[in-house]
Image (cartoon, rainbow, N blue to C red):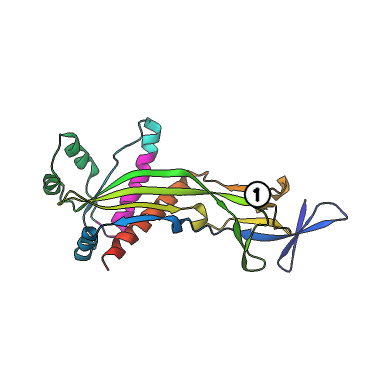
């Protein structure tokens, strides 16, 4: 299959005597529009008084598999590092875990022994989500367009971070957050779309044929780490914005 670009259009020659016109698209799924955010007035008051509270990250349900636990720990390290880079004091989570395992310490005791304002429980970090994206940005026409049929879409990976924030000195729930992002928030993934907007192919895979559905999947661990950082930055922005 041979390609040539003429006036913003991609011409893909299927035979020596016929050619089909293709355009170039990319997706902008905006999965963060489905974020779920619940924040108590008490947490907002605390953040107004102290925009950079001392925090500790807790993992209530760590993976039992050793390999998965090590991988998950690398994501938690990214979360802690991002908070530190944004000016938060991050306390030792091992100390908190030891206190929690020692019995039923009250939250005032936890605050005294850890010098912590907020506990952020990482309830889940899920890389297996998907969303069917049925519109695309046409880079050729510079317009947002829909695919022609309901059977045509990009199956896009979605990453979700679920966490709970506890105000330590009160032992009170301060917030619940489910935040989402996708690889398309980090990088531009371009694909060819046929003139009928019914079939497509990733640009580097066009020689394999055109299909009504293509998948945007997270293959690399480095991308998972970057997406974890992106979600943490979103959480930090919410906590920082609550105090304004």
Q: Is residue 80 magenta?
A: yes
Residue drawn 64% across the image and 52% down it: 150
* Magenta span: 72-88
Would you call the spot at circle 1 few (<14 residues within 10 Å), some (14-19), or many (20 or more)?
Answer: few
**Residue shown at 53% from the left, 43% from the top:** 219
Q: Considering depth in this image, is 95 or 59 the residue closer to the camera?
A: 59
**72 to 134, vertically: above or below:** above
What residue do we see at 65% from left, 49% from top? Answer: 151
Asked which secondary structure carries label 1, the reply is: loop
Between 8 and 169, the residue placed more toward the observer is: 169
Whether residue 130 is in magenta: the answer is no
In the picture, the quarter occupied by the C terminus is bottom left
Can residue 59 be seen by looking at this rendering?
A: yes
In the image, 34: left or right of 208? left
Which of the pair 44/221 is nearer the observer?
A: 44
Residue 62 sits in which quadrant? top left
Q: Is residue 186 visible?
A: no
Residue of label 1: 151
Q: Is residue 90 left or right of residue 18?
A: left
The residue sitting at 25% across, 57% down in the picture is: 40
Tell me the chief SS of the magenta region: helix
The relative height of residue 21 versus residue 102 in the rendered view (above or below) is below
Judge left or right: residue 233 versus residue 95: right
Residue 38: give x, y in percent of width and height.
32, 55
The quadrant in which residue 188 appears is: bottom right
Give x and y (percent) for residue 36: 38, 54
For this orientation, the residue located farthest to the right is 17
Q: Residue 79: horizontal and vertical position, in percent?
A: 34, 50
| Residue extending furthest toward the top | 65
Q: Splitting the image into 4 quarters, where does residue 73 fall?
A: top left
Q: Position of residue 214 (x, y in %)?
A: 63, 48
């Amino acid at each position: 299959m041979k390609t040539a670009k003429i006036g913003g259009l991609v011409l893909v020659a299927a035979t020596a005597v016929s050619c089909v016109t293709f355009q170039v698209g990319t997706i902008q799924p905006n999965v963060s529009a489905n974020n779920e955010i619940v924040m108590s007035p008490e947490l907002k008051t605390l953040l107004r008084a102290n925009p950079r509270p001392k925090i500790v990250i807790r993992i209530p349900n760590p993976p039992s598999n050793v390999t998965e636990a090590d991988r998950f720990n690398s994501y938690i390290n990214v979360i802690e590092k991002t908070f530190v880079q944004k000016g938060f004091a991050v306390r030792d989570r091992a100390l908190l875990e030891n206190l929690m395992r020692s019995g039923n310490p009250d939250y005032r005791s936890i605050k005294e022994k850890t010098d912590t304002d907020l506990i952020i429980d990482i309830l889940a970090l899920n890389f297996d989500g998907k969303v069917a994206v049925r519109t695309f940005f046409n880079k050729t026409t510079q317009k947002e367009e829909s695919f022609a049929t309901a059977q045509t879409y990009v199956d896009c990976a979605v990453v979700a971070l679920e966490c709970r924030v506890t105000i330590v000195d009160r032992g009170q729930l301060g917030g619940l957050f489910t935040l989402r992002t996708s690889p398309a928030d980090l990088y531009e993934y371009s694909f060819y779309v046929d003139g009928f907007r019914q079939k497509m192919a990733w640009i580097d895979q066009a020689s394999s044929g055109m299909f009504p559905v293509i998948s945007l999947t997270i293959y690399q661990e480095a991308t998972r780490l970057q997406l974890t950082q992106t979600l943490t930055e979103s959480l930090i922005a919410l906590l920082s914005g609550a105090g304004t």
